[in-house]
Amino acid sequence: MIAPSQGRFMSVEVALAVLHQGGHWLLQLRDDVPGIVAPGCWGLFGGHLDPGETPKQALRRELWEEIRLRIEGVDLWYRSDQGDRVRHVFRLELDVPLHQLQLLEGQDLCLVRPELLRSGACLSPKLGELRPLAPSLQEALDHYEEEVKGTIR
């Protein structure tokens, strides 16, 4: 995205949630729509920050829009900056049963142990197909594994 008046490149900011329950992460299978980020890949719930929105506000809005989940207290797990994209990644407990969520964006959702994602793909229960991981999910998985190994404090 170019700021027309300044002629500079502006980064896109997103807020993403690692929602965990019983050692499993909640994943979203993104739609197979050309032009979106990581179409047809497994990712984390969340999305772009609207103008004037904080990452926490964006996360609350996105979780409501995507799965009708209301969240309260949330703490930033990590932030990454790739230059063109800034990710604000939050980690929080999913305290409702999966069947209470309404999938309003994406093709499928499922709870998966992070260790099973190391293969780089995950089976969609709804489609019966293996689908790859989105870069943002892969990054969160790498961060988790580094943390488990004790290299991140």
Image (cartoon, grey):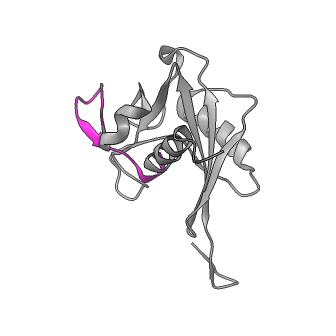
Location of residue 4 by image quarter: bottom right
Is 125 covered by the magenta stretch?
Answer: yes
Residue 138 seen in the figure: yes
Horizontal side of residue 78 vs 124, given as left or right:
right
Residue that sits furthest to the front in the current view: 150
Q: Position of residue 85 (x, y in %)?
A: 56, 63
Q: Is residue 99 above or below residue 108?
A: above
Location of residue 6 by image quarter: bottom right
Residue stretch in magenta: 122-137
Residue at the image point whose x is 60% and y is 57% from the top? 80
Residue 103 seen in the figure: no
Residue at the image point whose x is 29% and y is 26% from the top? 126
Instruction: Please state, as top left, top right, bottom left or bottom right, where the C terminus lies in the image.
Output: top right
Q: Is residue 23 above or below residue 114?
A: above
Q: Is residue 73 above or below residue 35?
A: above
Q: Nearer the viewer, residue 136 or 106?
A: 136
Number of numbered callouts drawn: 0
Q: Nearer the viewer, residue 137 or 51?
A: 137
Q: Position of residue 25 (x, y in %)?
A: 48, 30
Q: Position of residue 63 (x, y in %)?
A: 60, 34
Instruction: Please state, as top left, top right, bottom left or bottom right, where the N terminus lies in the image.
Output: bottom right
Horizontal side of residue 106 vs 13, given as left or right:
left
Horizontal side of residue 78 vs 140, given as left or right:
right
Residue at the image point whose x is 73% and y is 43% from the top? 57
Location of residue 65 by image quarter: top right
Q: Nearer the viewer, residue 143 or 56?
A: 143
